[in-house]
Amino acid sequence: MFKILKNFFDFCSPEDRKRFYVSIALSLLQAIFEALKIPAIACMVKALLENNVTSKTCLACLGIMLVSIVGSGLFKSKATMLQTEGGYSTCANKRMKIAEHLRYLPMGYYNENSLGQIMSVTTNTMQNLENVATRVVMLVCSGLLTTAVITVMLICFDWRIGLILCAGLVVFFLINSGLMKASAGMAKKKLEKDSALVAKVIEYVQGISEVKAFRLTGERSRDLNKAIDENEYANSSMELKLIPYMTLQSFWLKAVGTVIALASGLMFLGGTMDMLTCIVMIISSYLIYAQLDNAGKYSALLRTVDVSVRQAQEILETPQMDISGEDMTPARFDLAAENISFAYDKKKIIDGISVNIPEHTTTAVVGPSGGGKTTFTSLLSRFWDVDSGRVTLGGRDVRDYSMDALMRNYSFVFQRVYLFADTIANNIRFGQPEAPMEKVIEAAKKACCHDFIMALPEGYDTVIGEGGASLSGGEKQRISIARAIMKDSPVIVLDEATANVDPENEAELIKAVEALTKEKTIIMIAHRLKTVRHADNILVIEKGRIAQQGRHEELMAEEGIYRSFVESRREAASWRL
């Protein structure tokens, strides 16, 4: 229990940890004021036994009670406020820290499993910590402190009753230890099922169009329902397994209270305890364990807190790419790959590629699906680090740059565009949040999207759905290009930017790409002949190697993959219905 509490406090930032420590100190003061009820009761009982109840006695007892109630209430209110602030602040800071940490993880980290875990940790896990964990931690701490204060006070009244109380606490903690061990594996399984459920929900929602198109609704629903059922089973199993321990804890505390009352009565009858102490002990036996009983019941959730903290720490401890380079700007913007190799999950994707890409030139990357085109461009822009060899920008290894300094030199237009649930203006100025509206409009005009934006109900202030769901594919692509134009980076990476665009939008999109790529170093992945034939250099990548390279005319003059690629496209283009 104490180790879990320490792990939680270590998880908090120094400022939030201070809030919790002050909260615990206030809880101790609250416990002292709570314990003042016992002297107030003793004062009144003594007056009754001596038949000396006066208005002065009543006012004194009332005063002590009021001080106890008011002091306890004030300290509890302040402690609760601090622990709530600490809990929400801790989780907010950790969410931000996780988001910042994720920026510098290699792209290979992101897969279906990790996305489910990330979503679960940043939603369910952090919500558990901010809504449940902080209250559980403080309830446990408050229960332990209150019991400790009352125990010391009862020892001062009668050391024998104090020994009975201490013996009862020893047995209580043994039972609680069993509860904590029982909850250890269950808590981990519960959170694993939470993550699995989130992953299934994401998969189902993201693939809903395919599910409907291929009439897989029932099958996909079965998978989702299975995840829901397993999550329900994990939660209910945990509750059912822990209920006996919680019941035994509660029963034992009440039993010890009963033993204290009986022992006090027997000591009085035996003449070894006066009536005042006997009555105070009997009354106190009902007050001693009230806070500890709550602490014992909620302590079962400490394991969930512990596992939640560990899950968040696992993400934060995932090794980042080395980003400790220099904050520098290259003198020129040529790129080079020097015998680079890269493997993912023991499968070699890039195998000894060397190529020079002069600045202000266009390099097209073509080749069979799965040949390594996207991985190659990702290595050039350091989305991954090479296993061997090196990639240079302006003659310097890309690992010599800090990540932020390196990314300032690149703009990306991906085949699958992601737009945020925000205004169109803010999506365009994403790389320059403080950019004035005039620059936003200028970029939109260059990207050929000003006209359709102005046709929208709120123009540039129109809020688009998450992922740009309210826009067509061509419109999203042009906004993505406007975003890249705003960033105005010297190196542009185009990954199938026109692949999924209808003919009506293609002309506009090609104009937008031309506006984006003027006087830039261009690396483009493409399957369309018209987008590659005018490139300064064409790289044909197959099985992780450069199979051919040269200009369009040179590659057409020799047998190889490129000529087959072009001829197959021409044949397909000649088909008519």
Image (cartoon, rainbow, N blue to C red):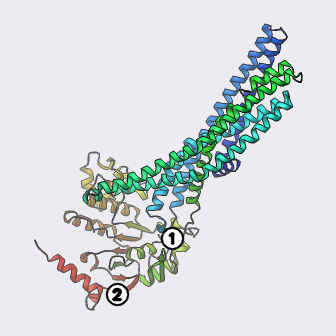
Q: What element carries label 1?
A: loop
Say left or right for 406 vs 441: right
Circle 1 packing at 10 Å, graded few (<14), some (14-19), many (20+), is some
Residue 114 in view (yes/no): yes
Instruction: Give me the residue at 28% from left, 75% from top.
Output: 527
The residue identified by callout 1 is 329
Q: What residue type is labelled 1?
A: Thr
Compared to residue 342, the image places residue 446 above or below, namely: above
The location of residue 477, given as percent across then percent down, is 30, 62
The location of residue 225, given as percent across then percent down, is 38, 51
The location of residue 323, given as percent across then percent down, is 56, 67
The location of residue 35, given as percent across then percent down, is 75, 27
Circle 2 packing at 10 Å, graded few (<14), some (14-19), many (20+), is some
Q: Which of 524 and 170 is in front in this view?
A: 170
The residue identified by callout 2 is 548
Instruction: Give me the residue at 64% from left, 35% from top.
Output: 294
Residue 433 in view (yes/no): no
Looking at the rendering, in which quadrant would you find the C terminus?
bottom left
Which mark, residue 224? Answer: none
Q: How far apart are marks 2 and 1 (CA)?
A: 32 Å
Q: Is mark 2 on a helix, strand or loop?
A: strand
Q: Which amino acid does label 2 sit on?
A: Gln
Q: Which of marks 2 and 1 is in front?
A: 2
